[in-house]
Image (tube, rainbow, N blue to C red):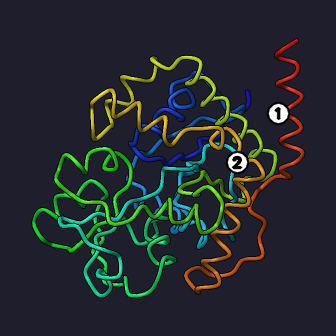
Amino acid sequence: MTMMRTLSLGYSPCPNDTYIFYALTHGKVAIPGHTIAERLEDVETLNQLALDGLLDLTKISYHAFGHLRDRYALLCSGSALGRGCGPLVISPEATEMKKLRGKRIAIPGKLTTANLLLQLYGTGYEDLLILPFDQIMPALMRSEADAGVIIHESRFTYHQAGFYEVIDLGAWWEKDSGLPIPLGGILARRDLGKETIQLIDRAIRASLEYAQEHPQEPRAYIKSHAQELNDEVIDAHINLYVNDFSLDLGEEGIAAVETLLARAEDRGLIPKSGEPLFGVARNAERGTREVRSKEQTK
């Protein structure tokens, strides 16, 4: 009898992640020879767990990936990457970014892509208050910071809370680079080996495809972890962060990741690395998917 190996998988309680991983963690999709032990944490906690090497697989900020490339490889599937989905800088009063230099800014984690974009935007934004993403707006209401960088569901609710948008860092990135914004990706430990990493990548894609084919089935699971239970907000969140890049980064997605990491390296915000982005040959994996897709349509 073959022994099953348990893989630890970390992801956030946000609707896009619970949507993607529902099938994989509920017995609808399997990784041959392996079982999954999921751990749901906010993204900055996941970043820290990966830095300590405590997870086999994990959702990660692309900023954190810049510090983890020697130990972890990027997967082709599962990323949060796109257009019109970047973090926003908000403030209790209408203001401009130049007026926030030297001011205290609340961020959802030091290693989040939200903070990396803030630092890439310019200098003078180093006085940071690090909080869980859902505590940033309450902190601004208590005047604990002058502005905040918001992500996830907060993007859809800050207007109702009376805040003003200072800048959309994602829109700035898209205009400046001409590329979509890489927010978070899925990593696998390189020491799992190429064969296992390839199986994992296929399973994550299959898990997302299952959710797309059965969109209402994961709803109770999503709501059991979501910060905002409104169906319209949940749907908007999933529609914004889950897209074709989530199925496969593709050449444009890879270019976006490489550009983000290169700019961060140039600014000294992440260390340089000689490791490739992926743990398997991407072209071979993509070819396998194309063959499988053609077979399914026969």
Position of residue 105 relative to residue 4, above or below, is: below
Q: Quadrant of residue 105?
A: bottom left
Amino acid type indicated by mark 2? Leu
Q: Which mark is residue 133?
A: none
Q: Position of residue 152 (x, y in %)?
A: 38, 49
Amino acid type indicated by mark 1? Arg
Q: Taking 44 as reference, is 54 left or right?
A: right
Position of residue 80 relative to residue 191, above or below, is: above
* Whether residue 256 is visible: yes
Q: Residues within 10 Å of mark 2 (few under 14, many from 20)?
A: many
Kind of element beneath mark 1:
helix
Which residue does the image show at 46% across and 35% down from the upper left?
238
Label 1–label 2 contact, CB within 8 A: no
Q: Which residue is mark 2?
A: 249
Q: Residues within 10 Å of mark 1 (few under 14, many from 20)?
A: some
Q: Taking 296 as reference, is 28 left or right?
A: left
Check the picture and name the quadrant holding the C terminus.
Answer: top right
Q: Position of residue 121 (x, y in %)?
A: 48, 76
Mark 1–mark 2 Cα distance, whole angstroms, equals 13 Å
Check the picture and name the quadrant holding the N terminus.
Answer: top right
Look at discs 1 and 2 and give the one toward the viewer. Answer: 2
* Whether residue 3 is visible: no
Position of residue 276 relative to residue 81, above or below, is: below
Q: Across the whole image, how many numbered discs are drawn on residues?
A: 2
Q: Nearer the viewer, residue 119 or 179?
A: 179
Q: Which residue is mark 1?
A: 289
Which residue does the image show at 69% across and 53% down from the upper left?
253
Kind of element beneath mark 2:
loop
| Residue ranking furthest to the top | 298
Q: Position of residue 36 (x, y in %)?
A: 56, 37
